[in-house]
Amino acid sequence: LTSEENGSVTYFEVTESGPVKAVVMSEGVWSDPQGASLCDTFGSYYASPYESFTYSLALTFFRGRSDFKVQFHVRNQCSNGDGTDWTDQSFLIDRASYSLDFSNGIGANIFSSHYYGASSTTSMSNSFPSGPSVETIVEQRKGSGNPWRRSRVQSNGSPIENSEFFEAPLIAVTNGSYFAAATLGNMRFREPQALRATGSVVSIDIVSERQRIGEGKGIW
């Protein structure tokens, strides 16, 4: 489900507009056209069916700075809060992400590149030519084996770098004149998460692999 095709905004407000900082907040829902996203735990006995998947987004901008802070929270609101089965309204999701399309200013072409930061704070020299279909991913995968933590960088599905975790995960797109980047400061502790560049689109995946979201639970 995508916000462009299957979502709607239920709340939008500029919550802070001072001389130094501005904060914009938005909330919304994702809806399956066939009704699969509706929560109907009581068979409409207590309440009408409602949407299970909601999100909250807060963008914080600072005066004199080109960067901004993204806070993104995805929830499974479906829960009856009754009885002894606390997992019957859980869902499996493959991916939950916040994406920004920079194609108007950083169009993907033969002159543009993807950059990534991974093992150290100075590894921004790693780059790949990018086009509309090129995808570069920096990800902290689900824990498995020994060592438990697993991270990797991929370009179009081909592994570039592997580690237990990345100290400075970052993804960026550039056309030589403009540069747009994203990072997840605590990605190494909150797997599975990822940073993704697809053409000129930069995505923050707060869920990057299939994961079960319990009833009445949220991920950020």
Image (cartoon, rainbow, N blue to C red):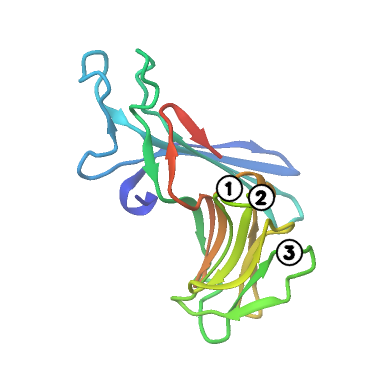
Sequence-wise, which precedes: disc 3 or disc 1? 3
Percent across and percent down for residue 143 are 57, 49
| Label 3, residues with CA under 10 Å away: few <14, some 14-19, many ≥20 | some
Q: Residues within 10 Å of mark 1 (few under 14, many from 20)?
A: many
In percent of the image, x 69 and y 56: which residue is there?
67
The picture quadrant where one finds residue 105 is: bottom right
Q: Amino acid at mark 3?
A: Ser
Q: Tell me the CA gap for discs 3 and 1.
A: 17 Å
Quadrant position of the C terminus in the picture: top right
For residue 67, above or below residue 73:
below
CA separation, marks 2 and 3? 12 Å
- Assess disc 2: are there few (<14), some (14-19) or many (≥20) residues with their C-alpha within 10 Å of its C-alpha: many
Residue 83 at x, y percent in the picture: 35, 12
| Kind of residue at badge 1 | Glu
Marks 1 and 2 in Cβ contact (< 8 Å): yes
Q: Is residue 9 above or below residue 118?
A: above
Residue 188 numbered mark, or none: 2
Instruction: Specify the label residue 119 is tagged with.
Output: 3
